[in-house]
Amino acid sequence: MTKNQSVTIELKTSEKADKIIKNHLLLSMGFGAIPIPFVDIAAITGTQISMISKLAGIHDVQFSNELGKSVLGSLLGAVGSNTLATGTLGSIVKFIPGVGSIIGAVTYPVIAGATTYAVGKVFQRHFETGGTLLDFKASDMKHFFHEELEKGKHVVATVKKPFTKKKAEEPVVAAE
């Protein structure tokens, strides 16, 4: 394999990884809008496990569900209680009748999408540098996760814009 072929393969793998992350970010945002507290968290966690599995697959890294759950839990635990509390609070607020469902449906998809983006970017980097699930050290990825979480908030905002902008531009039809 020549150097140019190697670069092409790496670009294709990186492009595949970016697509996987974006698709799972969108799924997480949708699951974040589920009005039932804790069901949303379970669906988002499942989506993140699926994403890690697919990222492992394109990097030829062995994956198991149990180990995937373990490394995801260690990452989320390592990033701190603020991140976990924000996510859990976004789900719990849905318990408040009426307004809680509205607030949760608006805010929690953003939290879910940004977190999924950050998780994806962490594992993308880890696998691209030759890492496996067995040698994953969550504490080494804490700072990078927080950086990617901030980027994820901006990515989610750009994903939401076409939907919110389109609605605002739709013509108002007068009732007949």
Image (cartoon, rainbow, N blue to C red):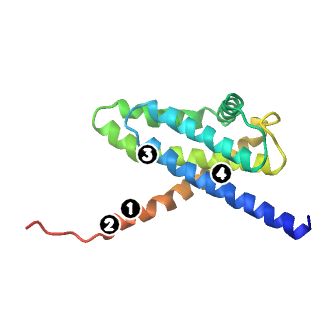
Label annotation for residue 146:
none
The N terminus - image quarter? bottom right
**Residue 108 falls in image quadrant:** top left
Q: Amino acid at mark 4?
A: Glu
Secondary structure beneath disc 4?
Answer: helix
Residue denoted by label 4: 148
Q: Residue 73 at what x, y percent from top left?
A: 66, 31
Q: Residue 171 at what x, y percent from top left?
A: 25, 71
Q: Nearer the viewer, mark 3 or mark 1?
A: 1
Label annotation for residue 164:
1
Tell me: residue 118, above or below residue 139: below
Lower sequence index among marks 3 and 2: 3
Residue denoted by label 2: 168
Determine the CA span between mark 1 and mark 2.
6 Å
The C terminus - image quarter? bottom left
Lower sequence index among marks 2 and 4: 4
Relative to 40, is 173 on the left or the right?
Answer: left
Tell me: residue 175, above or below residue 114: below
